[in-house]
Amino acid sequence: MVHQCSKPSPSDSYKPNGNISCQAITLPHVSGVMALLLAAFPAAPAEAVIKAVRDTAKHPEPDRRPDNRWGHGVVQIKAAHDHLKDSYPPLG
């Protein structure tokens, strides 16, 4: 879901062997998106928010979605927001 994962520079201290997991990068990004959407749409069940994030993600190869490299694709928070506002009233 994050556009690119790469090996950090030698000065990075993420892991002693210099590798970083794409999942380790993706988790905080997607968690933040989920938190923002759940806060904006308190009436929306978590399952609906998860579905909106998955359905609106952009995958570079849509016919292979999901896959082990990109998962469901790159998160599109505005598209997920717009998808949810059709079914649930936004806060405020």
Image: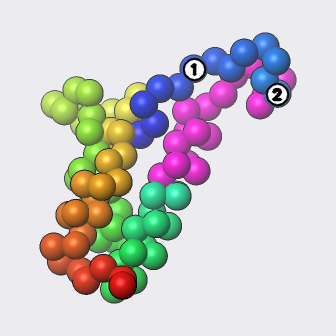
Q: Is residue 65 left or right of residue 36?
A: left
Name the residue rendered at 33%, 39% in the picture: 73
| Quarter holding residue 42 | bottom left
Q: Amino acid at mark 2?
A: Ser
Instruction: Point out the image quarter for the C terminus.
Output: bottom left
Span shown in magenta: 14-30
Q: Which residue is mark 1?
A: 6
Name the residue rendered at 18%, 77% in the picture: 87
Element marked by disc 1:
loop
Depth check: 28 or 78 in front?
78
Colour scheme: rainbow
Specify whether residue 16 is in view: yes
Query: N-terminal of the two: label 1 or label 2?
Result: 1
Depth check: 30 or 23 in front?
30
Residue 68 location in percent, x, y?
40, 31
Q: Amino acid at mark 1?
A: Ser
Per the image, is 19 magenta?
A: yes
Q: Which residue is mark 2?
A: 13
* Residue at the extreme front: 92
Name the residue rendered at 58%, 39% in the picture: 25
